[in-house]
Image (spheres, rainbow, N blue to C red):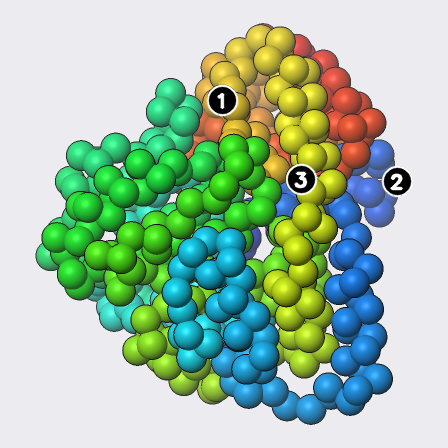
């Protein structure tokens, strides 16, 4: 039997967040007390009113194939949410519901990009962006940022990255992995630049919208002069603790929405009917249902910052959203323990996993090799123990 795989799959990297989760589970299965701070998943349960909506959907026999872009009533709920929360005007025909925001992003890449076209990624970026772009045979162009600028780009950086081949710009705010949040003024500056390049599409990943500590969420789609060049990606996974329900959506110019519907029709068709009815309940609910969860994340953020800031050699900023820290740990590169030399963030993550029994994710996966990502989506007790382990394990390096 010919067991040769396609070049496509051979060139595809494994998700490093999922890889570290897998490694930590393997060690746990061996009986080791591993704490995983590697996965981006709220540790809260889905609100009851959303679960009740799913149960009602089953009883009412929402168990058949759904329209490819989603139930009209869910798409209308998404459009209404965008108007209510963000003052964005979209018709339901401009909404496409998919099996998670990851699926939405893949639809966009496959529907818009051609081989050789360029996509600007603002580093740090979410791990799967670059692989989605590679699947579409386009070329990722990385614009690097550092902790000194709160992991945000300058307009000069962005302008210098644009070429005649640039087709898209992808970024998230609040950002996974840095927790950085772009202000209205910063987004306006980006929009003012990109309006001079009418063929460039901005993909604004806003899946962490509700988990921000600065108040009102700002979307780059709010500026009418650039709106026809913007695709908003959102969903219910993070803000409503619905990761397993797998519901994401885009709000886009209709020609892009139609293209994504066509693409999705050949891959998955419409996503789970029961999950769609649950998502409708989430989007129609008052956003106060997530207030307790967001408040808990803010307390945890402050706890982790207070615990981490005293660890020698670690440089940190104050995240404004999501539930991650992305500290610069490059001062530990070149240090060693019992002959084991730490060359980079990947080595450091493996050292912390094997010696400290704490699973983190290397910054290499996010385009910033000086850093590593810490998820604080777990209890305060677990966070205290894990940061203590990190501190003690790093102290072994000389």
Q: Which residue is mark 3?
A: 294
Q: Secondary structure at mark 3?
A: helix
Question: Who is closer to the viewer here, 295 or 377?
Answer: 295
Q: Tell me residue 109's x, y (percent).
A: 36, 67
N-term mark: 3 or 2: 2
Instruction: Tell which tag, 1 or 3, sits nearer the viewer.
Output: 3
Q: Quadrant of residue 203?
A: bottom left
Q: CA distance from mark 3 to mark 2?
A: 33 Å
- The reply to whether callout 2 and callout 1 are in contact (CB within 8 Å) is no
Q: Residue drawn at (35%, 24%), measured in percent from left and top?
A: 149
Q: Tell me residue 366's x, y (percent).
A: 45, 41
Q: Residue drawn at (69%, 21%), measured in percent from left and top?
A: 303
Residue 332 at least partly seen: no
Where 295 falls versus 134 (above or below)? above
What is the number of the mark on residue 317?
Answer: 1
Q: Tell me residue 277's x, y (percent).
A: 69, 75
């Amino acid at each position: 039997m010919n067991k040769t795989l396609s070049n496509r799959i051979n060139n595809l990297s494994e998700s490093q967040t999922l890889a570290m989760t897998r490694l930590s589970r393997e060690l746990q299965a061996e009986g080791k007390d591993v704490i995983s701070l590697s996965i981006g998943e709220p540790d809260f349960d889905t609100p009851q009113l959303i679960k009740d909506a799913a149960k009602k959907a089953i009883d009412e026999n929402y168990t058949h194939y759904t329209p490819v872009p989603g139930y009209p009533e869910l798409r209308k709920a998404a459009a209404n949410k965008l108007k209510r929360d963000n003052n964005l005007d979209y018709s339901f025909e401009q909404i496409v519901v998919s099996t998670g925001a990851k699926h939405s992003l893949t639809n966009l890449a496959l529907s818009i990009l051609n081989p050789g076209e360029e996509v600007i990624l603002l580093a740090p970026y979410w791990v799967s962006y670059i692989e989605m772009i590679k699947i579409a045979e386009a070329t990722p162009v990385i614009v690097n940022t550092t902790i000194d600028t709160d992991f945000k780009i300058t307009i000069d950086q962005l302008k210098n990255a644009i070429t005649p081949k640039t087709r898209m710009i992808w970024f998230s705010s609040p950002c996974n992995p840095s927790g950085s949040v772009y202000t209205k003024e910063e987004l306006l500056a980006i929009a003012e630049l990109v309006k001079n390049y009418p063929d460039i599409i901005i993909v604004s990943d806003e899946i962490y919208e509700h988990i921000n500590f600065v108040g009102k969420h700002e979307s780059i789609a709010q500026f009418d002069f650039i709106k026809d060049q913007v695709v908003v990606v959102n969903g219910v996974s993070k803000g409503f603790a619905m990761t397993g329900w797998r519901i994401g959506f885009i709000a886009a110019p209709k020609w892009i929405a139609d293209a994504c519907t066509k693409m999705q029709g050949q891959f998955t068709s419409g996503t789970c009917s029961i999950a769609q009815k649950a998502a409708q309940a989430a989007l129609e609910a008052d956003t106060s249902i997530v207030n307790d969860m967001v408040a808990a994340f803010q307390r945890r953020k402050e706890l982790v910052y207070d615990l981490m800031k005293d660890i020698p050699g670690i440089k940190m900023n104050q995240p404004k959203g999501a539930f991650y820290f992305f500290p610069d740990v490059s001062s530990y590169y070149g240090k060693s323990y019992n002959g084991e030399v730490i060359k980079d963030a990947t080595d450091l993550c493996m050292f912390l996993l094997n010696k400290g029994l704490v699973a983190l994710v290397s910054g290499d996966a996010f385009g910033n090799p000086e850093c590593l990502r810490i998820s604080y989506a777990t209890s305060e007790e677990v966070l205290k123990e894990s940061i203590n382990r990190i501190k003690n394990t790093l102290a072994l390096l000389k």
